Amino acid sequence: MTGLTERLPHVAAFPAALGTGLLLHTDAALNDGIRDRIGTFIDTYESALSRFRGDSTVGRMRTAAHGGTFDFPEWCGPLFDLYDRLFDATDGAIDPCVGEDLIRLGYDAAYSFTVEPGAFGTDDDATSNDTTGNTGNGGRLRDSGHLGALHGRATWRDDVERHGTTLITHQPVALDFGACGKGYLVDLIAGMLEAAHAVPQPVQYVIDAGGDLLTHTNTPITIAMEDPADPTRAVGAAELRSGAFCASAPSRRHWGEAAGHQLHHLLNAIDGLPVDEVAATWVAVQIESSQDDAGRKGNRAVRREVDWEAGLRNHDVPPAYSTALTDGLATALFTTPANQLRAHFDFDCAILNADRTAAQSAGFPGGFFVR
């Protein structure tokens, strides 16, 4: 992000947040206490939603032999709503129950990166799918060894009964909220920051959660679009003043090959397999405050002035989760055509395919470099 340090010189770092770290850039120093409150909330967030913590609510769902009733914090409601919408918009290709497939493919809480025997339907040799030289279950979920909803894996629609923020299951269910989870945390932190008036108004900030960005600046910032084949290079650039910008690519989280598949974290939940047709996606949702022209259409969301922190206490539903949506759509574009998603959501995007062909929507705030 060009010139960010000069424009927003104050940085609060949370290096352990969600496994990727989170940076909060502001134009003035944070008030006393707000950093501690944000850090405490990050831990609270992970204690509910992280599948990498055995003591989290999600972790307890995975180990409940006969399922059970699991109460999540009320602030999880909009996140669950978004997953309902993404599940429907993608015909089940985006499904938090994909956590079970990720575990079988080796992306487990221990980061074993060891494919479970039989994950691809070959049980003859216990080491046939082992990409690391290690074998063993390590406490991970097992079944007949087949991936995806097509082979009987639980689904968000059919196997998780939802009543607000209470989830009821009848078997172990491994949820993964990674498609939207970083973006949702960014939105909640932005709300806490604005509600607490932690910096002088008008506030300028950029929140960066492992490359998932929420920007609120007076002038646009320039964002490099990383080449998934070479992280030292860019394939394009975008500019954004106020809005969310998220990218997704398998290049940052991949761990080998098995049964002819390059193993990475971007799966189609229907068949449970890594997607190989798309190399990278970028999604932008621009935001206007209530003082801007709220009548504009297209990819612009409207953020009303609300007390977000009070909302978290009083169980109100904040109005805008643009980063969560942008984050989820960046993943959904690996499984679902952009035109299909645009029938359900307003956004702009750019897509780099595995064969290095590229496309972008007319309103995308940037473009690819052309030789």
Image: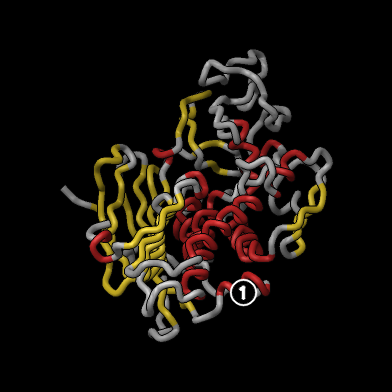
Q: Position of residue 289 (x, y in %)?
A: 42, 80
Q: Quadrant of residue 157?
A: bottom right
Work out whether 312 lies above or below 141. below
Determine the residue positioned at 39% across, 68% down: 243
Q: Nearer the viewer, residue 308 or 100?
A: 308
Q: Quadrant of residue 313?
A: bottom right
**The N terminus appears in which quarter of the rendering?**
bottom left
Looking at the rendered structure, the secondary structure element under dot 1 is helix
Residue 360 left/right relative to 63: left
Q: Position of residue 271 (x, y in %)?
A: 60, 39
Determine the residue positioned at 69% across, 44% down: 55
Residue 201 left/right relative to 266: left
Q: Residue furthest top?
A: 125
Q: Nearer the viewer, residue 39 or 101?
A: 39
Q: Position of residue 61 (x, y in %)?
A: 74, 45
Q: Which residue was labeled with disc 1?
A: 311
